[in-house]
Image: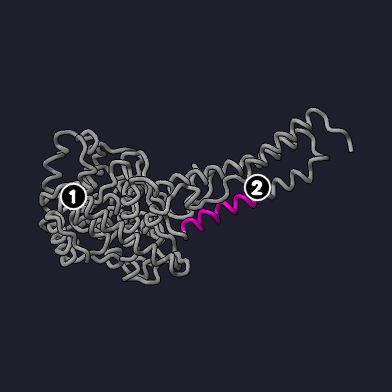
Amino acid sequence: MRSPTPTDRFLDRKFLALKARAGRLLELTPRRVGLRPQDLPYAPSRAHFTAANKRLARIGAVIAGRIAHSESARDHSDPSQRLTAMAMIEREVDRARRTFGMLFEIFSQRGSDFAPALAAHDVIAADCYAAVRAVLPDIFDGPMLKPLTYMEHGFSPATQRRGVALARLLGDLNPFPVIRIPWDRDNPWQPVFLHEVAHNLQADMGLWQENATALANRLATGGFDPLVISIFRRWHKEIFADLAALLLGGTASAWGMMEFLAHPGTRALTYRPGGAHPTGWFRALMLAEMLRRMGFPEDAATVERVWKRLYDPARGHRLPPILLAAAPRAIPAVIDEIAYQPRRNLAQHALADAIPFTRQDEARIRRAGIGIAAGRMPRDLPPRFYVTASRVALDAGGDPRVVSALVIGHLAGLHTQREAAHRLAPATLAA
């Protein structure tokens, strides 16, 4: 065996330092992310920690294999080969660091003042899945981890669905759905949160491609221009999430979404080529059409009247003329196709069948909202309905701080009860 050269010794030290870093970020526990005993009622479930650690363990196994290979080849590798081998290890260490870091940030927030609000939103998200399971018990492919919410900067809520490849993780797959809530949008009356949950439902029900194809075929059969067809096809995911949010929360979801969409006319009446989100002008009109189809014509007419009072293309717009001209006929067809036509992946049910919403549900939400405004917390609503009941409470004159405290406190309490029950039972992965 030849004597090590200064270059060999230098590379040995680099390799030693790399090995020391390689195994440091391969496990997440409540204690490691800083959760105290009093934080555990709001913590991610044991199943979420398990899923995170399985993902880290897979990365760790790759790292260990590459380290073992590098050690066995050390004596007959030239410096260039050794640097390449270490770069390959470094890539996986970086992957572990990114995965660990993202999940650490999400999990550790359950030890902050935002923990009750995050736990409350977890309960809302889980209930949206429960609503679908109640109608179609076998629609999802077995048990699955519920979405987990976290706080981050950004103007709007957003989601990263289950199994999507994330650039942030060097193309690794997201182990469970995560929903971002902007720091200032943690109050319970944000129907746009239902919209983000709906994106996850859409993905988990396998509807993306089926909806896109069906919508394009419907518009083509209707004789619409190819540009109009391509635009609505590109918008189909966001339209689905808007329509599902109305089915999950009722008429107040439309008003909440409109608050989010209400910008100066230069934005609401400007078409963005290639954008995934419908232009605001069309989006609110689709909400109105959905309310009409759901059986709320008076609310639909009011929504349309308010939106057209705020925005009038006759005063100026930056919309494709052919799209603007097609809207009166295209919008009813789009709503019917996405929400009311059967889908194979829904066992020949429509979205409106999978998430039924009735006038009785609307009445319950309105009664609950009036009670919340008066300081009385109704405890018999499905958690998803508290989103819109909170908005009704604000319309009825409720103090925003009181409404938020009542609703978040109640829903966070439900999270505490459920997690306590799971800790006493075998680990589950129920949505």
Disc nearer the start of the sequence (2/1):
2
Residue at the limit of the structure toward the front, as seen here: 37
Q: Is residue 232 visible?
A: yes
Q: Residue at x 23, y 55 (%)?
A: 407
Local SS, label 1: helix
In the foreground, 316 or 377: 377
Q: Residue at x 73, y 48 (%)?
A: 68
In the foreground, 43 or 294: 43
Magenta region includes residue 198: no
Q: CA distance from mark 2 to mark 1?
A: 51 Å
- Crowdedness near tag 1: few (<14), some (14–19) or many (≥20) residues, C-alpha within 10 Å: some
Local SS, label 2: helix
Magenta region includes residue 51: yes
Give the magenta part as a residue range. Answer: 48-61
User: In the rendered view of the protein, which quadrant contains the N terminus?
Assistant: top right
Q: Which residue is mark 1?
A: 402
Q: Is residue 292 visible?
A: no
Q: Residue at x 42, y 54 (%)?
A: 37
The amino acid on which the numbered mark 2 sits, given as a three-letter code, is Ile
In this picture, residue 386 sits left or right of residue 370: right
The amino acid on which the numbered mark 1 sits, given as a three-letter code, is Val
- Crowdedness near tag 2: few (<14), some (14–19) or many (≥20) residues, C-alpha within 10 Å: many
Q: Which residue is mark 2?
A: 63
